[in-house]
Amino acid sequence: MINFDLENTLFCGQSFCWRREDENYVAVLNNKVYRINNNSDITDPYLINYLDINFNYKETLNTIKEMNPVLNQAIETCNEIHILNQDLWETIICFILSQNNNIKRIEGIYDTLCKTYGVEVEKGYFTFPRPEMMKNVSEKELRDLKVGFRAPYIIDAINNSDLLLTIDTMEGEEADIILQKIKGIGPKVSACIRLFALHDLNVFPKDVWVKKIMKNVFEGSDESIFYPYAGLAQQYLFHYARLGYLDEYFKN
DNA sequence: CACCAGGCCGTGC
DNA sequence: GCACGGCATGGT
């Protein structure tokens, strides 16, 4: 049995690989097709790590609830959201794709990349392509797949994939330095990669939603009010706002 | 038609 | 250092 909020965890904007299929959630991870639902027993070691099963979210959430009433409401409404341990390369490409884009279209491009360059591990189910599988891809080819102006950014990431994948053991801002050498990776994309792949729960990605939240709800304070779990707090606020619960604050 | 979406780059000051 | 326009595409 799943004892946290699987729906909100998989569809709060941190990952782009999960789809609904009958009563299951489905994704291709670790070269396998995973199908899970709220009644699943998670015993697969990859999934235990991916879903961050062993971290004590209940205690942590009880702590950060005290920080602020709006954050408290977000946690009460969204229940227990886990920050996933996602594949580094996949996360890099997905969040390069995310810039000036929307989640539905990011998911569409994700599927296209898998279908075009990935490996079919089960009929109709493709892996997300490793950098080696995209070594000879041209910018025009990517533009034909509708990635738009992000095409050269992806090429740059592919060409520097050896360097990029060395950051998986790095602490904090070291990783930022390397990541932001890539064209198309700035502070926000870099923060998402650190939060969703390197699991730094204190980094605070500032997208258009979070900027709006900080300005209108927290009246210009910065993320230090959520330390040392700013990233986790951020994910609740982002999702809560996108669900429409903060609309009254945004009426100006 | 306009404006927006999990931004960033290049240019100009 | 900061402000600004441009950027591909699809949705509202």
Image (spheres, coloured by chain):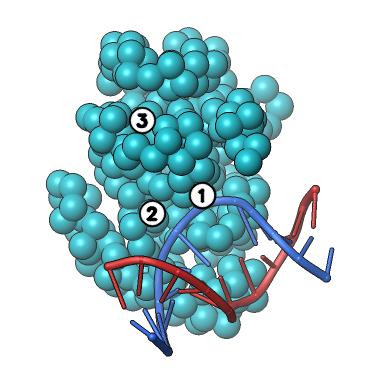
Chain colours: A cyan, B blue, C red
Where residue A111 sits, quadrant-wise, is bottom right
Identify which amino acid the numbered label 2 is placed on. Answer: Lys
The residue drawn where x is 22% and y is 64% is A178
Residue A118, percent across and down?
51, 59
- Residue that label 3 marks: A232
Mark identifier at residue A188: 2
Query: Mark 3 near mark 2, Cβ–Cβ under 8 Å?
Result: no
- Nearest to the observer: residue A51 or residue A71: A71
- Residue that label 1 marks: A208
- Nearest to the observer: residue A135 or residue A218: A218
For label 3, count other residues whose C-alpha is less than 10 Å away and answer few (under 14), some (14-19) or many (20+): many
Classify residue A165 as left or right of residue A219: left
Q: Is residue A201 visible?
A: no
User: Which tag is nearer the camera, tag 1 or tag 2?
Assistant: 1
**A91 up-or-down from A29: above or below:** below
For label 2, count other residues whose C-alpha is less than 10 Å away and answer few (under 14), some (14-19) or many (20+): some
Which of the two labelled residues, at mark 3 and mark 2, occupies the earlier sequence position? Answer: 2
Residue A9, percent across and down?
49, 28
**A165 up-or-down from A68: above or below:** below
Identify which amino acid the numbered label 3 is placed on. Answer: Leu
The chain under label 3 reads: A
The chain under label 1 reads: A
Where residue C1 sits, quadrant-wise, is bottom left
